[in-house]
Image (cartoon, helix red, strand yellow):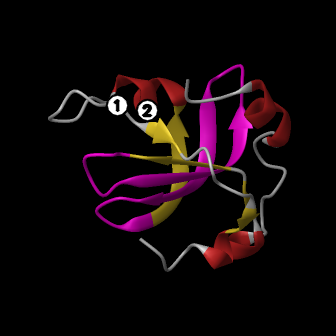
């Protein structure tokens, strides 16, 4: 399961952290266990299933991604995207330069 009830309670609605930049708090981290992509969610709209956050993929960029997109990914070994169960919320400034 990519999102728990606790995650849903912790994630603020879209737009709440607008303008905070790297001071925005990252509440949930998702990653590809077979690749190098990582998604750091700062906000979420449960009706649309849409996140806003920092994505480390081919480049590092802020943007929107959906729960459906994350759930649809299957890597070469058949593994899907996972949620970092040990993630502790922190400002994006503490992860922006990490891989």
Which quadrant of the rendered structure holds the N terminus? top right
The mark closer to the camera, 1 or 2, is 1
Residue named by callout 2: 70
| Residue closest to the far top | 47
Crowdedness near tag 2: few (<14), some (14–19) or many (≥20) residues, C-alpha within 10 Å: some
Residue 31 placement, left or right of 7: left
Tell me the quarter of the picture where residue 14 sits: top right
Q: Give the Cα distance between marks 1 and 2.
A: 8 Å
Element under disc 2:
helix
Residue 62 location, x and y as percent?
A: 54, 60
Which quadrant of the rendered structure holds the C terminus? bottom left
Q: Are marks 1 and 2 in contact (CB under 8 Å)?
A: yes
Above or below residue 62? Residue 2 is: above
Residue 56, numbered label: none
- Mark positioned earlier in the residue sequence (1 or 2): 2
Above or below residue 56? Residue 76 is: above
Q: Residue at x 55, y 47 (%)?
A: 84
The residue lying toward the viewer, choosing from 92 and 59, is: 92
State which region is magenta: 32-60
Residue named by callout 1: 80
Residue 97 placement, left or right of 59: right
Residue 34 placement, left or right of 45: left
């Amino acid at each position: 399961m990519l999102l728990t009830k606790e995650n849903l309670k912790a994630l603020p609605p879209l737009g709440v952290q607008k303008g905070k930049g790297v001071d925005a708090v990252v509440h949930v981290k998702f990653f590809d266990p077979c690749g190098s992509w990582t998604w750091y969610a700062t906000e979420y709209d449960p009706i649309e299933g849409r996140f806003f956050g920092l994505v480390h993929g081919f480049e590092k960029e802020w943007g929107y991604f959906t729960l459906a997109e994350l759930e649809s990914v299957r890597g070469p070994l058949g593994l899907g995207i996972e949620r970092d169960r040990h993630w502790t919320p922190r400002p994006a400034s503490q992860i922006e330069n990490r891989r």
